[in-house]
Amino acid sequence: MRKPMIAGNWKMNKTHAEAVALASSLKDSLADLKNIDLVVAPVFTALTSVASIVADSNIQMAAQNCYPADNGAYTGEISPLQLTDIGCSYCLVGHSERRQLFAETDPFINQKMKALLAAGILPILCIGETLEERESGKMFDILKQQIVDALENIDPQQAFEIVIAYEPVWAIGTGKTATSAQAEEVHLFIRDILCTLYGKTVSQQIRILYGGSVKPDNVDELMAQPNIDGALVGGASLKAEDFSRIAHFK
Ligand code: PEP
């Protein structure tokens, strides 16, 4: 019932020319796919060019970040309105690299969520625990806090279109994937929290992606889980062949 989504987070990789080449290649290799949301998140400098390449394709574009204001004296930042203007449909929010390297807090993430929704961009909200949090038994409390804080004052009419990406921090860029059972356990937990916040119908509509070293050789098992609705892919999204195989999961 939920439409699957495969999203590629290119992070701070690719020159403009390389990003254009990757987008063109994906446009061809993903062209046969239907009934799936395919999303790429290039660096800001490549967004406009990638937008024109994917404009008449089944690929949508995400930004990797935004600042929660329409415009103004925020040197170096980009607003949700500016992202709408160049054709972004989605924006990543709360990625663990932004939480860890740029000290982004849950209240700030909530501001971004609301600003994006107001501008008509759907947030892909990333949450996840560190290895220490998992091993010390704090994982579920941490995840619950991240969700509840990020969704504060977001009503069900907006929430049902939000995408959540569960990305255990210990699995990002490490080659260590959560087992499909570990991922499914957390996805079910997330859906239960969403049910408490928004009720059963909305919680069943919200897509929950798994992220963390998703590769061609593990995607099929992950996608076979009932509460895993897609994948947020980092490293493997940088090669057209790998991302295409992931998007063609079985
Ligand atoms: C990510 O950064 O969102 C991610 C999932 O990265 P990787 O696939 O490289 O672990």
Image (cartoon, helix red, strand yellow):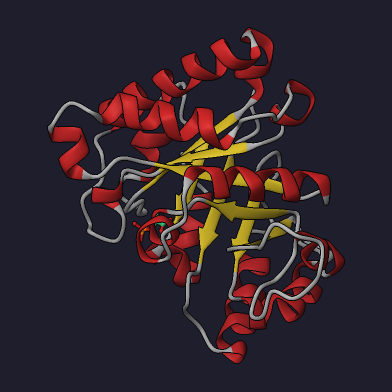
- Residue 9 showing in the rendered view: yes
Residue closest to the eye, 127 or 223: 127
Give the residue at the far front of this rendering. Answer: 73
Give the residue at the far left of this rendering. Answer: 135
Quadrant location, ligand no. 1: bottom left
Q: Position of residue 70 (x, y in %)?
A: 81, 62
Residue at x 76%, y 78% (from the top left corner): 48
Q: Quadrant of the N terminus?
A: top right
User: With respect to residue 153, does 236 lie above or below?
Assistant: below
Q: Position of residue 243 (x, y in %)?
A: 48, 60
Residue at x 37%, y 53% (from the top left corner): 216
Q: Position of residue 218 (x, y in %)?
A: 31, 45
Q: Is residue 174 left or right of residue 186?
A: left
Residue at x 13%, y 31% (from the top left corner): 136
Residue at x 16%, y 42% (from the top left corner): 132
Residue closest to the eye, 231 or 164: 164
Quadrant position of residue 65: bottom right
